[in-house]
Image (cartoon, rainbow, N blue to C red):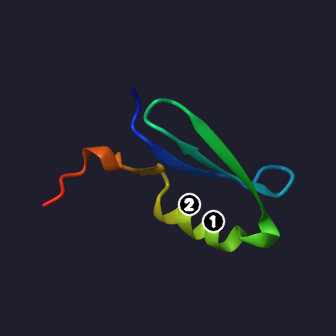
């Protein structure tokens, strides 16, 4: 079991960013974002979260 994460990778040689969303169970989905359609936003995210973002499973949240 891995920690859920979000990673922003790129831009690759085609000018695309890859946004990978991975669940704790290892399932993943990738979104491809052209540099001219959000590259600045993705670059900001990548600079602020260089090692990915860990998301907690909502089922584990304690509701008070």
Residue 16 picture location, percent across and down:
79, 56
- Which residue is labeled 1 in the image? 42
Percent position of residue 62, x then y: 18, 52
Report the label total: 2
Specify the quadrant of the image occupied by residue 4. top left
**Helix, strand or loop at mark 1:** helix
Residues at marks 2 and 1, CA–CA distance in whole angstroms? 6 Å
> Which residue is situated farthest in the right direction here?
14
Residue that sits furthest to the left in the current view = 64
Q: Which residue is mark 2?
A: 46
Residue at left 39%, top 26%?
A: 1
Q: Quadrant of the C terminus?
A: bottom left
Q: Is residue 5 above or below residue 50?
A: above
**As drawn, is 10 to the left or to the right of 16?**
left
- Give the percent coordinates (x, y) of residue 39: 71, 68
Residue contact at pointers 2 and 1, CB within 8 angstroms = yes
**Residue 56 picture location, percent across and down:** 34, 48
């Amino acid at each position: 079991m891995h920690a859920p994460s979000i990673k922003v990778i790129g831009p690759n040689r085609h000018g695309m960013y890859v946004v990978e969303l991975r669940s704790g169970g290892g399932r993943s989905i990738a979104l491809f974002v052209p540099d001219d359609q959000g590259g600045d936003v993705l670059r900001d995210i990548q600079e602020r979260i260089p090692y990915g973002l860990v998301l907690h499973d909502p089922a584990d949240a304690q509701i008070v």
